Amino acid sequence: MLANLIEFVTNHYVLSGVFVALLALLAFTEARKGGQSLSSRELTALLNSDQGLVLDIRGQKDFSAGHIVGALHIPFEKLTARMAELDKHKAKTLIVVDAMGQQAGAVCRDLKKAGFTAAKLSGGVASWRGDNLPLVK
């Protein structure tokens, strides 16, 4: 399998180069439109200075299994209908947290369009756990 891939790339180096360039461009654009990515340490600093609020968009089962202290829970599917609940937090940065970072970018984009300051936790709750940081139930 790997030998076939290497043979294809060497025989079609221009096509392969264009593919890699387009893939890099796509990754770059997707990363930019989702808003700023924060590390666990940056998120903690925002929370400690009372400048941020964690918005957990995972399902109820995942949220109940463990979430970041003080997180506001609004499941991804219900966010549009419940956006008005966030108006009282416009002065803070909303840090969107999901399971592994797959939906947070789209939510950040929507929040920014609605006039909020939004960022996402890079890697979601999985990276938070990976850094051995606490979750509450």
Image (tube, grey):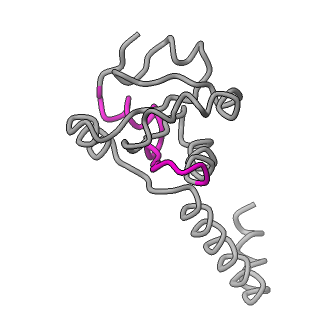
Report the label total.
0
> Residue 31 falls in which quadrant of the image?
bottom right
Does 43 appear above or below 6? above
**Residue 122 on the magenta segment:** yes
- Whether 113 is drawn above or below 85: the answer is below
94 with respect to 33 (left or right): left
Residue 69 is covered by the magenta coloring: no
Can you give x and y, in whole percent of width and height, for residue 130 in the image?
A: 37, 33
Residue ID at (78%, 84%): 15
Q: Name the residue rendered at 61%, 54% in the picture.
A: 113
Location of residue 9 (image quadrant): bottom right
Residue 26 in picture, x, y percent from top left: 66, 69
Q: Is residue 101 above or below residue 88?
A: below
Up-down relation of residue 12 to residue 68 (above or below): below
Percent x, y of residue 65? 49, 12
> With 114 as the anchor, is 69 left or right in this view?
left
Q: Which residues are magenta?
A: 113-133
Please name whichever residue, 99 or 59, is drawn nearer the observer in this view of the structure. Answer: 59
Instruction: State left or right for residue 106 relative to residue 66.
Output: right
